[in-house]
Image (spheres, rainbow, N blue to C red):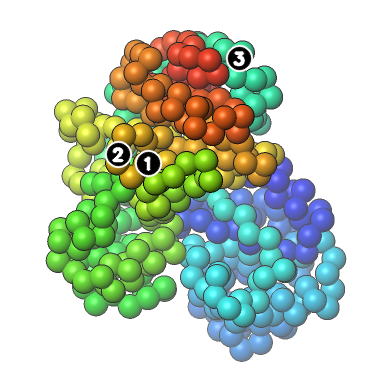
């Protein structure tokens, strides 16, 4: 995100960084700022509430305003400052919640460019952050050009261990597995017992945890609302409230269903995901060995892991890619992810736990190609094996680690 932020601040007065708590927003914001206001410090929060305009007036600029959601009044002051003097590079604003971002009358509209920030990707951890994302490279070279097989392929256990490690910087860079496990458990505890108070009232944190566990068990799936209600023992309005809270805190997300006038009877329900696959560990009480013994859970973890890489790649892509999924109403055809360009062309993506996919693993991509015609650019079947090879015309089988190698 650093090059993008530099470009935005060179041409716009204010940028809003949003993302999960502890994903690196403050650290990133500091690198692009000369001054810092931390609203999680009581003295600075008190001063901001008393006179936010005066708090922001003296800079130095660019000025980082950290944890805006603790003193929401500061956004009104930023709006007024930008309206009065719309010079580029005045404010970098960060926050750990999406609360109020879509409400009517929110003062950031037209003044703050929203930039999503997530945890570290494998590409960053491998020291290759400056390389173009995989889909950008495939679109540039064409799907007829087969990428080389990765020089150091990862096996299934390696993928599982990377996924359960997660992308939070403190986790990804920690040397001790014990530290990682306890950090994640503490993170989940704080989300369900403390952080939820920022975005809504939860009377029963234990029940919220059970709901989150049910979502974790069905990550990368389309669970019916009734299934979730029956599993946790809550009503529809409570589930809706929980969904809103968990998404505002960047713990879960929904990947919308793709639609087309060339395809009828598509399921309109979104797929549900944990934002970071590492949450599966503390929520379901599993480690790498446990995941490898459960085929269903292995597939869900890998799907969630691949989405975590592609979500971040799409955020920095120059192509304006958006991610969807496809499932038809009778369940005969399903495509794990669909990356759509602004002009409506699509790339189909399947994620397989096996290491040697065959033509049958590309069947849904072949169906999509026939259904949408020239809107279909190409397809990728990600797998856990070591080799890249061609499955069909315009459809490639690529090791998952091709995302970063």
Using a 10 Å C-alpha cutoff, classify the residue at mark 1 as few (fewer than 14 neighbours), some (14 to 19) or many (20 or more): many
The residue tagged with tag 3: helix, strand or loop? Answer: loop
Using a 10 Å C-alpha cutoff, classify the residue at mark 2 as few (fewer than 14 neighbours), some (14 to 19) or many (20 or more): few
Which residue is tagged 2? Answer: 331
Residue 353 drawn at (x, y percent): 31, 25
Residue 259 drawn at (x, y percent): 49, 47
Which residue is tagged 3? Answer: 144
Circle on res. 327: 1
| Drawn side of residue 144 relative to residue 11, left or right | left
Q: How far apart are the two marked residues, 1 and 3, measured between alpha carbons?
A: 26 Å
Q: Quadrant of the N terminus?
A: top right
Residue 64 in view: no
The residue tagged with tag 2: helix, strand or loop? Answer: loop
Residue 199 drawn at (x, y percent): 41, 73
| Drawn side of residue 224 relative to residue 270, left or right | left
Residue at point 80%, 76% (across, down): 83
Q: In which quarter of the image is residue 253?
A: bottom left
Residue at point 24%, 77% (across, down): 203
Check contact, mark 1 vs mark 3: CB within 8 A. Answer: no
Q: Earlier in the sequence, mark 1 or mark 3?
A: 3
Check contact, mark 1 vs mark 2: CB within 8 A. Answer: yes
Q: How far apart are the two marked residues, 1 and 2, measured between alpha carbons?
A: 6 Å
Residue 369 in view: yes
Residue at point 28%, 67% (across, down): 239
Q: How far apart are the two marked residues, 3 and 2, measured between alpha carbons?
A: 30 Å
User: Does residue 1 sit above or below 94 in this rendering?
Assistant: above
| Drawn side of residue 264 relative to residue 354, left or right | right
User: Does residue 283 sit above or below 210 in this rendering?
Assistant: above
Residue 358 drawn at (x, y percent): 36, 13
Q: Which of marks 3 and 2 is in front?
A: 2
């Amino acid at each position: 995100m650093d090059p993008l932020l530099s470009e935005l601040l060179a041409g716009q007065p204010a940028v809003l960084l949003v993302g999960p708590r502890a994903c690196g927003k403050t650290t990133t914001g500091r690198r692009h700022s000369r001054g810092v206001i931390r609203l999680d410090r009581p003295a600075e929060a008190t001063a901001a509430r008393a006179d936010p305009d005066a708090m922001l007036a003296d800079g130095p600029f660019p000025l980082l305003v950290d944890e805006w959601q603790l003193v929401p009044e500061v956004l009104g002051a930023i709006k007024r400052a930008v309206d009065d003097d719309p010079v580029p590079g005045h404010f970098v604003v960060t926050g750990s919640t999406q609360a109020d971002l879509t409400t009517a009358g929110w003062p950031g509209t037209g003044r703050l460019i929203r930039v999503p920030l997530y945890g570290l990707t494998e590409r960053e951890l491998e020291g290759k952050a400056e390389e173009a994302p995989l889909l950008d490279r495939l679109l540039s070279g064409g799907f007829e050009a087969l990428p080389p097989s990765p020089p150091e392929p990862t096996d299934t256990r390696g993928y599982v261990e990377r996924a359960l490690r997660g992308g939070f910087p403190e986790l990804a860079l920690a040397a001790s597995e014990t530290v990682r496990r306890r950090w994640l458990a503490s993170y989940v505890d704080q989300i369900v017992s403390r952080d939820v108070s920022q975005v809504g009232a939860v009377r029963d944190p234990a029940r919220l945890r059970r709901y989150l566990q049910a979502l974790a068990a069905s990550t990368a799936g389309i669970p019916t609302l009734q299934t979730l209600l029956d599993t946790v023992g809550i009503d529809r309005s409570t589930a809706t409230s929980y969904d809103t809270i968990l998404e505002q805190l960047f713990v879960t997300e929904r990947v919308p269903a793709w639609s087309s006038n060339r395809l009828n009877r598509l399921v309109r329900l979104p797929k549900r995901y944990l934002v970071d696959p590492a949450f599966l560990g503390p929520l379901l009480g599993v480690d790498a060995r446990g995941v490898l013994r459960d085929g269903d859970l292995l597939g869900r973890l890998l799907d969630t892991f691949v989405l975590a890489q592609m979500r971040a790649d799409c955020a920095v892509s120059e192509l304006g890619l958006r991610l969807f999924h496809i499932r038809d109403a009778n369940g005969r055809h399903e495509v794990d992810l669909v990356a759509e360009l602004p002009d409506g062309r699509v790339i189909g993506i399947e994620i397989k736990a096996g290491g040697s996919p065959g033509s049958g693993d590309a069947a849904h991509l072949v169906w999509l190609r026939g259904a949408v015609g020239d809107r279909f650019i190409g397809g990728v079947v990600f797998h856990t094996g070591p080799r890249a090879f061609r499955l069909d015309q315009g459809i490639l089988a690529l090791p998952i680690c091709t995302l970063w190698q």
